[in-house]
Image (cartoon, grey):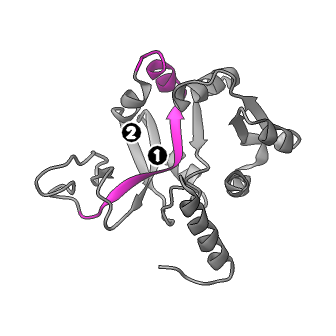
Amino acid sequence: MLLKFTLEHLKQYGNENIILLTDDEEIINEYKNDYKIMVDENKQPDVLYSINDCAKKLGVKHVFYTCVTNPFRQDGILYEMMKNIGDYDMCTTKVIVPNRKIFLIDDNDNFIYKSKKGRKGKYVKHNFMIDGAVYLVKCDFLEKICKTETPNKLFWESNFKTVLNNVPFMDIDTQEDMNNFNFYKKNINHGKTLN
């Protein structure tokens, strides 16, 4: 269900640009006639290795990665990210959250580490958090970090930029999260506004 929701959003960019990276036979059989599918056969310990393998096979200079468990993305966000990546290694999306205690970044995309006063930096006007909805990564950077033993660590220590994803934040990891997603989607479809 979450995959369908993500694919529906991505249609605005054209189906020919969408590639499903999966090792799930059910997904492969359901979508093989509509989308290009690359089978993740290596069971890599980190998804960055799988994305790098896919990018090398395609011979592209950059790749967008969208995670279906973070379903909400503002329309046109991929175009906004392309405009902002510049000389950065990667670009990702952030949301404004009022009370989140972890993964905060300041107005200049610097992580705010825990201190006696909490994680909010002295000059931070908003609490920003990386939401994981979309990543735009340059493939030469991806190739470089995947040659190391700690690609995920180096990924987050990179020179990166964020773009505001002006949508509700939801990370779906549990059945309760899925129930909240279904409730939210149902109420949005019926024109109700949720706080």
User: Which image quarter is the N terminus in?
Assistant: bottom right
Identify the disc placed on residue 160. Answer: 2
- Give yes or no for contact between labels 1 and 2 (Cβ–Cβ under 8 Å): yes
The magenta stretch is 125-149
Name the residue located 45 percent from the left edge and 37 percent from the top edge.
Answer: 90
Within the magenta stretch, is there residue 157?
no
x and y percentages locating residue 170 in the rendered image: 51, 60
Q: Which residue is at the front of the view, 54 or 152?
A: 152
Within the magenta stretch, is there residue 138?
yes
x and y percentages locating residue 92 in the rendered image: 46, 46
Within-10-Å neighbours for mark 1: few <14, some 14–19, many 20+: many
User: Mark 1 sits on what residue?
Assistant: 92
Task: Describe the element under mark 2 as helix, strand or loop.
Answer: strand
Task: Describe the element under mark 1 as helix, strand or loop.
Answer: strand
Q: Is residue 88 visible?
A: yes
The residue sitting at the left extreme is 116
x and y percentages locating residue 122 in the rendered image: 14, 57
Tell me if residue 183 comes above or below residue 18 in the rendering: below
x and y percentages locating residue 24 in the rendered image: 74, 36
- The residue under label 2 is which amino acid type? Phe
Name the residue located 83 percent from the left edge and 43 percent from the top edge.
Answer: 31
- Decide which of tag 1 and tag 2 comes sooner along the chain: 1
> Which image quadrant for residue 47?
top right
> Which image quadrant for residue 42?
top right
Distance Cα–Cα, label 1 vs label 2: 8 Å
Please count the marks in the image.
Answer: 2
Name the residue located 24 percent from the left edge and 64 percent from the top edge.
Answer: 125
Q: Is residue 85 visible?
A: no
